[in-house]
Image: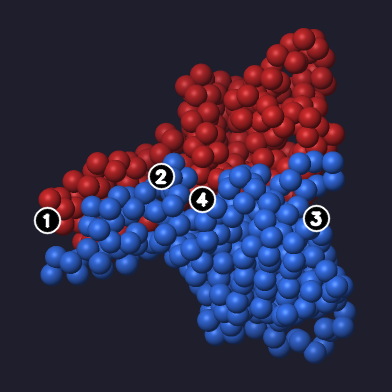
Chain colours: A blue, B red
Amino acid sequence: MLEMENISFAYSGKELLLRNISFSLSCGEWVLLYGRNGSGKTTLAQILLGLLRPESGSYFIDGKDASRLSLREMGQRIGFVRQDADKQLVGETVGQEMVFPAKFRGEIADSARNLLEKFSLGSSTDVSPLTLSYGEKKRLAIAAVLLRQPGILVLDEPTAGLDGKSKKELLDYLHFLQTELSLAIFLVSHDLEAVLPYASRVLCLQDKCIAFDGTPQDAVSFLPEEELPYFLTFSKRLGQIKHWDCVLAPEELAEKLKGELS
Amino acid sequence: MELKVENLGYEVRGKRILGNISFSVGAGEMVGLWGSSGAGKTTLLLALRGILQQYDMGRLQGQVLFDGRNLAAYAYPQLGREIGLLFQQTDMQLFSATVYDEVAFGLENFCVPAEEIACRVSRVLEALGLSGLADTSPRKLSGGQKKLVVLGSLLVLAPKILLLDEPLASLDALERNRILCLLEELKNGGMSIVLVEHDWEAARFVDRMLFLAQGNVLAEKQRTEIFTDRALLERCGILPPPMAIFLEAMGLPPADFFSMGQCWNRLKGAGYLA
């Protein structure tokens, strides 16, 4: 579905930020891109969207050379939810946000309503997006992007600023889209605790390159403890004692331990 | 130096955002505000900074006292120096051409001598790990780095009170830890800090936590008390930390979830570990 090979990138006049980046993303796959602050994660996401052109390397979407696709064609294939949702909300009301651009007006009233319900915004159709809380704005931005039914969804730090319950609801819904509609998800995040249990694959950006490409369990083994949240550190150490792969979700870890004793 | 909130309420366009909130934050104290999205945490921070009404022209009741005087009695520049506020969306707080200029801006406006500005800015940039980015445009930084720059522009003024709206969101684990350790240092130096967070790891550093839901404070708890009150977290729409979920699923009694030793001991006591 999406394939990058030996992509390198530098902002003009600066040294290389990304070097020889290669990876693929298939239908129904959820890839988490992780890296330290300033490691180039958002830049890589922007290359993926066609907003930045790489210096070298090749990039194909659905077998087509991405450098020959217009931004409009890229936009039809890939939906993007920015880190700062404020920057992509343009409607005067939540309802208008959902029918932007105008060509969707009328045709998608039902799907728009369903999506707003799904994101707990059904009762806010007539209010200004500006009056919504940060979490609500984020949910609205995602709902508006999904309305265009892209095959690939790119999200930059979607869980930042959300409470635990809202994070879980959002990630559960993305999981539904991934499994039921075979949507490919490319998610940039530091929030390993919340996102790792959902990812099918993890890419770690380090020193301008992809230093790791593998399963979430192996990513926990790969990453040093100081980069892991508290529960994952605990689970990693327990896994080392018990000689099993790191378990990512607390309920699953409890089941596994209890199962072992019985 | 104390920040005291007395019967604070706020209503905008007929919608009640804050109920009737009272609490205080003493010198050298870090108070956490916890609650689900839309609970009123950001609105409360704007009120503590004295800019809520300018923000969206609502109706404010009650008062916020800073060192015994109503915030409204202070000149605006003085409040800017004494009370620093880190917005959740930091882009709106960045406007200078370089990181250095951004951090120096406040001091320049208070006519601090150039040599002192250079010294204070360098110290803050170093503490935040930003020295190598001094000449970079803030707009070219990552979301997490922008947050650190804004924090630097506040800290350089040495405010007495620091209000932080999710300072850890979009920071990696090492930066989160750096910020939390820095906040603890500032707190120990006498700064009062009000911290809005969703990240449970920050709870390790706060002295008290206020739990908000629908614009009201439902409870005020010490850090060690919080994980045993599942009903309160439920009422606030908050998920417990993963370690709490794990121990509960194991049927084990709650522990201080930031003490790895206590959690190991729970497992050993129940025969899961040798």
Disc 3 residue type (three-letter): Glu
For mark 4, does the 10 Å Cα neighbourhood hold few (<14), some (14 to 19), or many (20 or more) residues?
many
The residue wearing badge 2 is: A225
Residue A49 % position (x, y): 76, 66
Residue A194 in the figure: left or right of residue B125: left
- The image's mark for residue B271 is 1
Give, as a three-letter code, the residue at label 1: Gly
Q: CA distance from mark 4 to mark 3?
A: 39 Å
The residue singled out by tag 4 in the image is B198
How far apart in space, not on screen, are marks 2 and 3 (Cα)?
Answer: 35 Å
Of residues B230 and B150, the one nearer the viewer is B150
Question: Which residue is disc 3 drawn over?
Answer: A55
Label 2 close to label 4 by CB (< 8 Å):
no
Mark 1 vs mark 3: same chain? no
Q: Are marks 2 and 3 in contact (CB under 8 Å)?
A: no
Q: Secondary structure at mark 2?
A: helix
